[in-house]
Image: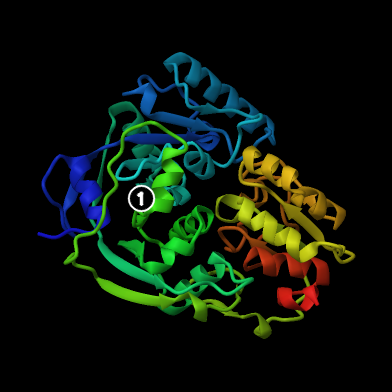
């Protein structure tokens, strides 16, 4: 029987010819990714690791250490890495970054492979044609110690992307359109393909794959093309086998989206599913903080767009504009390109690579009744700090424009 991309990857990982929606797949894990939060949640020692060469450890949530607890967890993590000889370790320093972005930069997520991580946005690896999924703490420990886990195979929704995004329109706007139009994708996989892929950068694909977690999707995966394959080959000599859907694969739904029709959207506070409106509906909403960063929107593309919007201008009085590159490598590239200087001259605070403000951990936590507009992953109540804070979500261009104006507005309004 014909299979989708995710079904093919799960079948390979299970050692069987085929799987279909509804099946239980007991799979061999290709890569397991741990973060500093793993060691904050589990303070006891792990007794074994099934294959140190397949384990990645990345400190990202509270780096540099934001408390005594996070410092102690990172000490435990360093001892774990040393004990088991784990070489793919990204500590605080020049090679730090948010785990999902580190996974992409180093091509730890190979096309056609299966990757698990202890964070819900692990699905970001799907941009590389990898079946990547976040799992709970006990499942994560089981995967690290045994090299196996299991999933119930979900049905798949296919999105055929056609056309080209208009200037100033972000993949985040495309995500908000999907969430607004089609709602959640609970117990489903999402597969992206179509002729528009040729015009979407790997950063754009990563944004869409990452935000799949906010659709409640099981796996999110992109069809492989030359752009993706060249990206991976530049970063690794490891062998891999990309997977493609069969022409007659069975989908729960197949939808075509014209990228040229996408317009800027803003998600209202507390939810993203069916909760976005055109910018005009909230134009004039004052803000206290604007944030650009996270695994979804701290890429070089995002920093370039933010710098373009704020160049020659200054952040509005009373507004805090926090920008967090996803990795230190992106930070360095942004410095060389002049984006960091442009942002800082405009009044932004540019932080080291970390989950930071997005997860409400540090470097931009919201206070009582603060109003924030964010280009990050979530706008849930209490996500970025005080539960009384209001969090709007939008593209980096819209967030940067709000930082300059002091209220929500279209980027075109501040670029005049």
Q: Residue at x 49, y 68 (%)?
A: 175
In this picture the colour scheme is rainbow
Q: Is residue 277 above or below residue 9?
A: below
Mark 1 surroundings: few (<14), some (14-19) or many (≥20) residues within 10 A: many
Is 111 positioned to the left or the right of 178 in the image? left
Where is residue 92 drawn, in percent x and y? 64, 29
Is 344 positioned to the left or the right of 169 in the image? right
Q: Residue at x 40, y 61 (%)?
A: 216
Q: Is residue 201 above or below residue 77?
A: below
Q: Is residue 197 above or below residue 334?
A: below
Is 88 positioned to the left or the right of 94 in the image? left
Q: Which of the pair 233/17 is nearer the observer?
A: 233
Where is residue 405 drawn, in percent x and y? 82, 72
Q: Which quarter of the picture shows residue 257? A: bottom left
- Which quarter shows the C terminus? bottom right
- Which quarter shows the N terminus? bottom left
Where is residue 334 drawn, in percent x and y? 70, 46
Q: Which of the pair 199/142 is nearer the observer?
A: 199
Q: Residue at x 44, y 47 (%)?
A: 122
Q: Which quarter of the picture shows residue 392? A: bottom right
Q: Is residue 46 visible?
A: yes
Which residue of the protein is positioned furthest toward the right in this rendering? 317
Q: Which of the pair 324/214 is nearer the observer?
A: 324
Where is residue 247 drawn, in percent x and y? 19, 65
Q: Residue at x 70, y 58 (%)?
A: 291
Q: Is residue 329 above or below residue 384?
A: above
Residue underneath mark 1? 129
Q: Is residue 288 visible?
A: no
């Amino acid at each position: 029987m014909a299979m989708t991309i995710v079904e093919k990857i799960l079948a390979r990982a299970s050692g069987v010819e085929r799987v279909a929606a509804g099946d239980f797949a007991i799979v061999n894990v290709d890569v397991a990714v741990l973060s500093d939060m793993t060691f904050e949640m589990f303070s006891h020692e792990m007794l074994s690791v099934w294959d140190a060469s397949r384990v990645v450890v990345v400190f990202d949530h509270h780096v540099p250490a934001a408390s005594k607890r996070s410092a102690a967890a990172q000490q435990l993590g360093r001892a774990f890495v040393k004990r088991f000889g784990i070489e793919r370790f990204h500590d605080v320093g020049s090679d730090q970054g948010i785990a999902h972005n580190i996974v992409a930069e180093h091509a730890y997520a190979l096309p056609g492979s299966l990757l698990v991580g202890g964070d819900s946005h692990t699905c970001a690896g799907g941009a590389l044609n990898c079946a990547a999924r976040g799992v709970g703490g006990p499942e994560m420990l089981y995967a690290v110690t045994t090299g196996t886990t299991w999933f119930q195979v979900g049905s798949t929704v296919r999105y055929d992307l056609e056309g080209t995004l208009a200037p100033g329109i972000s993949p985040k706007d495309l995500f908000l359109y999907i969430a607004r139009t089609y709602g959640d994708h609970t117990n489903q996989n999402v597969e992206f393909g179509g002729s528009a892929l040729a015009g979407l950068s790997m950063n754009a694909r990563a944004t869409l794959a990452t935000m799949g977690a906010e659709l409640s999707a099981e796996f999110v995966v992109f069809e492989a093309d030359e752009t993706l394959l060249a990206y991976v080959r530049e970063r690794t000599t490891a062998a891999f086998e990309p997977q493609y859907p069969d022409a007659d694969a069975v989908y729960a739904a197949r939808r075509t989206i014209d990228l040229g029709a996408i317009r800027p959207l803003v998600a209202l506070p507390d939810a993203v599913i069916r909760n976005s409106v055109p910018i005009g509906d909230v134009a004039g909403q004052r803000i206290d903080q604007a944030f650009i960063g996270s695994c979804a929107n701290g890429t070089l593309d995002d920093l370039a767009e933010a710098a373009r919007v704020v160049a020659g201008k200054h952040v509005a009085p009373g507004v805090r504009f926090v920008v967090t590159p996803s990795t230190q490598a992106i930070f360095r590239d942004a410095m060389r390109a002049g984006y960091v200087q442009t942002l800082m001259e405009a009044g932004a605070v540019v932080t080291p690579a970390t989950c930071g403000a997005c997860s409400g951990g540090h470097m931009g936590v919201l206070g009582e009744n603060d109003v924030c507009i964010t280009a990050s992953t979530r706008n849930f109540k209490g996500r970025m700090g005080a539960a009384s804070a209001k969090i709007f979500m939008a593209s980096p261009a819209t967030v940067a424009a709000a930082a300059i104006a002091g209220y929500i507005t279209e980027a075109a309004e501040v670029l005049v």
